[in-house]
Amino acid sequence: MFNKTKKRIINTGQNLPQATYGKQFELWNKRDRLVKKPIMNQSRKDGTVLYGGHAVNALVDKNNQRYTYDFDVYSRQPKHHALQIEQSIDQGVNADLAYVEQTSYPHGRKQKPLFRVRTHMNDNVEADFNTMPQGIRFTKRKGVRYETLGRAEQKYDRMLRHPEFGRGFNANIDMGRIRSFKRRR
C-alpha cells in the first residue's frame, strides 16, 4: 500500500550521538514515557484524535482488547506532531534513534500525506500521523480524544469490502472486538 510512493526522510536528531541497539532497548523500556505519554498529551492539548487499535482498546472492555504497537493519530498539523514525537524519543534516549518518514497513501484518486515516526535500528513504526478528516466525531476518555466505535466500524467495513489494501486481517479482528463489546453492553 505504501511502497509505490516517494518517501522523504526528516531527521531533527542528527546533532545527537548515533543510536545503538542499547538505545533501542532503552526506548522499549521507556516507551510509555517517550511515546505514549507525549501522544496522549498532544490529544489533550492540541486536539489530535487517536484511531486504530489503540483507540479501540481504550473504548472496549479488557476482554475485547488486543496487542497493538504503533499509534495512529489524526492531526491538523501531522508533520509538526510527528516531529514532536521524534524529538521526544531522541531526547529521551539521548541519541539519534528516531526519524520521520513523509510518505503518502491512496485515497480515492488522490494521494494523502502520512508522517510516520520510525526508529533507525530496526525500522519499527512508533506512530503514524494522518491529516484530520473534517467533521470527525470522537469521544474523550481522561481528556484524550479517540475516534468513536461507530466510525471505526465504518472504516473496518470499508477495509473488508476492499481487501486489496491488505488491511483485512486486523480490520476483521477489530470489527469482531467492537461487535463483541457492543453485545455485552
Image (tube, rainbow, N blue to C red):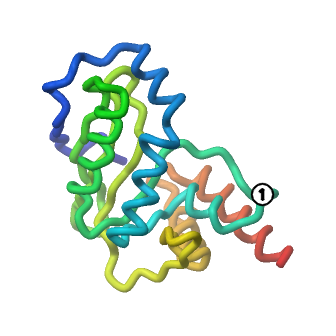
Horizontal and vertical percent position of residue 175: 67, 65
Q: Is residue 45 above or below residue 6?
A: below
Q: Residue at x 78, y 70 (%)?
A: 181
Horizontal and vertical percent position of residue 98: 30, 32
Tell me how many marks there are.
1
Picture quarter with the C terminus: bottom right
Q: Residue at x 19, y 31 (%)?
A: 13
**Callout 1: SS:** helix
Q: Is residue 136 above or below residue 3?
A: below
Furthest toward the bottom, the residue is: 135
In depth, the one of 13 and 50 nearer the eye is 13
Answer with the quarter of the image where residue 134 lies.
bottom left
Q: Is residue 108 above or below residue 91?
A: below
Could you tell whether 67 is left or right of 35 in the image?
Answer: right
Label 1 belongs to which residue? 62
Could you tell whether 92 is left or right of 60 in the image?
Answer: left
Furthest toward the right, the residue is: 184
Horizontal and vertical percent position of residue 168: 57, 54
Task: Determine crowd level at label 1: few under 14, some 14-19, many 20+ residues with C-alpha closer than 10 A.
Answer: few
Answer with the quarter of the image where residue 56 lies.
bottom right
In depth, the one of 175 and 127 nearer the eye is 127
Q: Amino acid at mark 1?
A: Lys
Horizontal and vertical percent position of residue 60: 71, 66
Q: Is residue 127 above or below residue 78?
A: above
Q: Residue at x 56, y 62 (%)?
A: 55
Q: Residue at x 42, y 40 (%)?
A: 34
